[in-house]
Image (cartoon, rainbow, N blue to C red):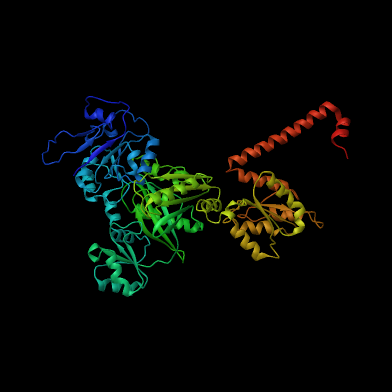
Amino acid sequence: MHARLLSAPSRAAASTSSSSSCARRHPRRASWDPRPPSRNPASPPLSLRARASMDPAPSQGRSDSPAHGVSDRVVGVLGGGQLGKMLCQAASQMGIKVAVLDPLENCPASSVCHQHVVGSFDDGDTVREFAKRCDVLTFEIEHVDAATLEKLEKQGVVCEPKASTIMIIQDKFRQKEHFSKFGIPVADFVEVDTLSSIEKAGEMFGYPLMVKSKRLAYDGRGNAVAHDKKGLSSVVSSLGGFEYGLYVERWTPFAKELSVIVARSRDGCTVCYPVVETIHKDNICHVVEAPAGIPEKMKKLATSVAEKAIKSLEGAGVFAVELFLTNDNQVLLNEVAPRPHNSGHQTIEACYTSQYEQHLRAILGLPLGDPSMKAPATIMYNILGEDEGEPGFVLAHQLIKRALNIPGASVHWYAKPEMRKQRKMGHITIVGSSMFIVKAHLDKLLQRDTDAVNKARPRAAIIMGSDSDLPIMKDAAAVLEKFNIPFELTIVSAHRTPKRMYDYALSANERGIEVIIAGAGGAAHLPGMVASLTTLPVIGVPIWTKSLQGMDSLLSIVQMPKGIPVATVAIGNAENAGLLAVRMLASRDPELSGRIYEYQQNLEDSVLGKAQRLEESGANEYLRQYMKP
């Protein structure tokens, strides 16, 4: 076992001598000094940077003094990749000290952690020494020495999540057995250890057949598909042979791949983040869309399966539950990661509590934060290496430059020193007022269909049953134009074009429409029928007709049954319908809200100006000057 410590820069420029406790308070990067010889001659010396020792860090539990900030406890993280880096960034914001154990001196987390111990996180001796300076151990990668963690737990070291959970997760076959035992739906699976056993599995499950390694499988590694019996031997060889440990799963025809981030506190409480859809490229997560565009019933089912799975495991922290939504609307668990996850990166910008802050809250016994989204729609795009070496860096830089010009886009660069094809080098998160809008921004980022992207995307829709309604409905259009709100204007008849109305209403949300203004006369079915088909707010405009002067339209709109709300305005007052739509849009658009305030101020100024002129000129003069027939 060999490790050395890299600490954050000290404010003090130099020091001639210091004790180990002083070194912890004032670490320096100035020199490399060996640790004094160990009292145990069997233990090899540790090469340490900045004179820091591997002695235990002071624990909050061993002191009666109050915490300075959120927590005085030191969090030790096994692994210093991009997940560790973002965990350290969240910790820094909260004033929590994080020590990282990673074999790479320039690992992504090294630039932002409080202390970096250079050493292997799957070496038992190194982990034991590292644990001495931490109050709680956690992980950014599950491929750690779980047996050592189990021993440390017996010695009183706090590991979150627990070693028992890591052991289950490390072996994907054991993971499947565990979840199956707890009644959590998974694809049919069976262990295989000979050619005859895998051939029998092929006969049982049919082809294509998913063949998987039990251990060290992630980002598409360790998985292979056999399309027929003839391909079994080559698939087994590609995975290292049966001695490597293999199992097979029944092929799952899925409609979407989903993920749910579940946070569990030390007292067992759980909170779930909104269900997201993950889109993979060459078996690597490429895009995450939040929230997932699936029915609410399916979201509840996915959340229920995810929460049940995590409650079957031990320990606190953030867990990612990857799921399949099948073509027949079943939700099957694919696998679980006992740590922050790629499918939760967007929570940094999109949610009130990021998955990284949540993980720290959970493992430290702090109250769990609000996981709900503060942005209506988000897309996370992984920056994957497109080429080897410097050409790959050039391509990534070009992508980042475009991202800096995208509204609502945030760039996260992991600062990995080596570029490889398909390697996760960073990610870009785009937030917006609708999924349609953020997808349009992603298209612009990726230079797809740029002409269509540059066109203003409609946020509002004005529809009417007949062109005879246009003289009234044009007033709503004038208001939207006044506030620079892109909109679409068309004819949709509930009675004469029912299929068009049905398709229009169902697709409105997906196309980025945020509010619908529907004008109708007579029976006025259009607003109510559209409202029954969409989750968007619908404003009905009663149109004046000769027969009943619009009263039939007004009463038809306001008499909608419970559960199908339609807002309405005075007969023929499409201008107010336009203003109401603007206010609805402004509820999550601060810039538009400011324009509404300015509009109201102008109305007030106009009335006050009229009052002043009337008071100064008198009634007759006012009528003569300002109210000429």
In the depicted view, which residue is nearer to us: 210 or 538?
Answer: 210
- Where does residue 434 sit, x and y in percent of width and height? 55, 50
- Residue 101 x, y percent position in the rendering: 27, 43
- The reply, left or right, for residue 208 in relation to residue 103 is right
Q: In this view, does 235 lie above or below 144?
A: below
The image quarter containing residue 188 is bottom left
Q: Is residue 482 above or below residue 200?
A: above
How many numbered discs sit on the rendered protein?
0
Q: In this view, does 96 lie to the left or right of 585?
A: left
Q: Residue at x 27, y 38 (%)?
A: 134
Name the side, left or right, on which 472 lies relative to 508. Answer: right
> Where is 156 relative to 298, above or below?
above
Question: Could you tell me which quadrant the N terminus lies in?
Answer: top left
Decide which of 154, 577 is in the foreground and name it.
577
Query: In the displayed image of the protein, which residue is found farthest to the left?
Result: 41
Can you tell which quarter of the image residue 496 is in?
A: bottom right
Residue 156 visible:
yes
The spot of residue 13 in percent (x, y) is: 30, 26
The extreme front residue here reads 391
Rendered image quadrant of residue 5: top left
